[in-house]
Image: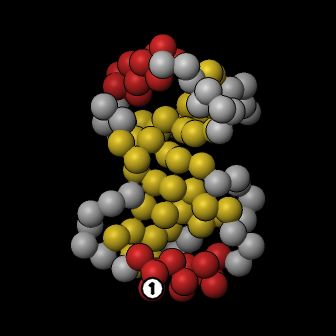
Amino acid sequence: MVRIGAIVLNVSDSGRAAEFWSDALGYQREDNPDFLKPCNGDGPRLHLDDTDRTHLDLWTADKTEQLAEVKRLESLGATFVEWEYPDDADFVVLADPDGNLFCVINADA
């Protein structure tokens, strides 16, 4: 089953956003300062990005589960989104029935 692994948040100033969201949520910066994680380890990560749109990253345990979840989500009404995928892509971009984009990530990759 997929879980919300990360929320990608479009921001104009990642340093300012990291300071605010760390304090607001009780999160801490990871090695990459644009990635925040819960101090208590419970909850999704927050990715601060000035180029990507705000969206959910749904994580799966491995490639097999990722493919099964993509099919399951499509059966629920999600649609596959044409994207410029790198050769080693660990994500599949889908859209929900309202057109909101989200990614299904192979967290094992």
Residue 4 lies, in percent from the top left, at: 40, 47
Residue 57 in view here:
yes
- What residue is rendered at 27% in x and 63% in y? 42
- What residue is rendered at 63% in x and 84% in y? 16
- What residue is rendered at 41% in x and 76% in y? 25
- What residue is rendered at 30% in x and 31% in y? 1
Q: How crowded is mark 1: few (under 14 residues within 10 Å), some or many (20 or more)?
A: few
Up-down relation of residue 28 to residue 94 (above or below): below
What is the quadrant of the C terminus in the image?
Answer: top left
Amino acid carrying label 1: it is Asp
Residue 39 lies, in percent from the top left, at: 30, 76
Up-down relation of residue 102 to residue 73 (above or below): below
Q: Is mark 1 on a helix, strand or loop?
A: helix
Residue 6 lies, in percent from the top left, at: 46, 54
Question: Residue 31 occupies which quadrant of the picture?
Answer: bottom left
> Quick check: 82 left or right of 31?
right
Up-down relation of residue 46 to residue 92 (above or below): below
Residue 89 in view here:
no
> Quick check: 67 left or right of 86?
left
Q: Name the residue under label 1.
A: 23
* Front position in the image: 89 or 4: 4
Tally of marks:
1
